[in-house]
Image (cartoon, rainbow, N blue to C red):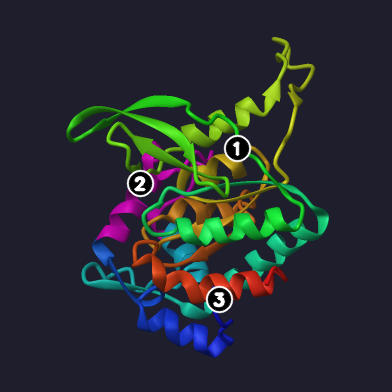
Amino acid sequence: MGRVPTRDELRAHLVRTMIAGDVATPRQNNLLHFRRMAARNPYYLFGLDLKPTWTEREILRVMVERCGVDSDPLHLYGDDTIDPELTIDALEAMGDRIGLAARRREQVVLATGHPATLSPVYQAVAAALAERGCRVLTPAAGWTYDIDTSYGVEERRIVYAPEGVAMLEGDDGRTHHTHDSAPMETMLAELTSGSTPADGSAERERISWPDLAIADHGWAGAAGQAGIDTVGFADCNDPALFVGAEEGKIDVVVPLDDGVSPHHYAPMTAYLLDRAGLT
């Protein structure tokens, strides 16, 4: 991962690479996603069962406080912002929880809906945790389902990087971006056995339940909804995880632009692992 940057150095790097600060995500795209989440469009809920009372204005408030987007409701077009101080604060909180997992040798699950950009971060964390004796779970490998795309119906399957990071692969053999919560829900279902009586009097047996999920998008939402300690990353146009954190269903959400070149995340990864005591 290279040299660990200081907080000031990391902040400058985040701003320079547009991971935080003035980001490339259009304000109009953010507001559209806030509106669709408020309308409870499943694609924007990331598998979270959030309270039905969230309005666009309340979502904006949360995104200002937890992500650092522009607070002006009349700012309708142009670029938006992510506060780099909030990014680093959350990154440190994530590092603290990952460090606790390492000390306890917890069972962890890692997954990303942004394999093209964020997978190196997850792979580094997974490898470091495994080296400290944590069990990285890899349930439901090869599970498939169909999705509707602009090109028609396509198949997606759960695959794992060698370090144990879950992602989706398509018929073309490439990994794909996803917001879906179904893959994580399926992974968790495989880690559960038995049957639930009709009267709900008994819980299903959990064979090998994760102590911690490190994820994003629907992977994180489904884990948090299932009651698993969940830490992850989210862009300023992905309000569901931030609102989930506001409701206490997600433990830590690191705000960042999740679509920059993968190598730009290396200093952030080094900082995260150092904070976790995994360097």
Query: Quarter of the image containing the N terminus?
Result: bottom right
Q: Reading the chain from its start, which is encountered first: label 2 or label 1? A: 1
Residue holding disc 2: 177
Q: What residue type is labelled 2?
A: His
Q: Find the residue positioned furthest to the right.
A: 104
Q: Between residues 261 and 188, which one lies in front from this camera angle?
A: 261
The location of residue 95, given as percent across then percent down, is: 66, 67
Task: Answer yes or no: is residue 87 visible.
Answer: no
Say which of marks 1 and 3 sits in front.
1
Q: Residue at x 42, y 31 (%)?
A: 157
Percent position of residue 202, x then y: 79, 18
Give me the C-alpha separation between circle 2 and circle 1: 19 Å
Q: Residues within 10 Å of mark 3 (few under 14, many from 20)?
A: many
Measured Cα–Cα span from mark 2 to mark 3 = 25 Å
Circle 3 sits on which residue? 88
The answer to whether residue 110 is left or right of residue 131 is left
- Labels 2 & 1 near each other (Cβ < 8 A): no
Q: In terms of secondary structure, where does tag 3 sit?
A: helix
Classify residue 155 as left or right of residue 157. Answer: left
Most extreme residue toward the left is 151
- Magenta span: 29-57
SS label for mark 2: loop
For badge 1, the amino acid type reads: Thr
Which circle's residue, 2 or 3, is located before the other in the chain?
3
Q: Is residue 103 above or below residue 152?
A: below
Judged left or right of residue 10, residue 130 is right
Does dot 1 land on a helix, a strand or a loop? loop
Mark 1, residue position: 138
Pointer 1 or 3: first along the chain: 3
Badge 2: residue crowd in 10 Å (few <14, some 14–19, many ≥20): some
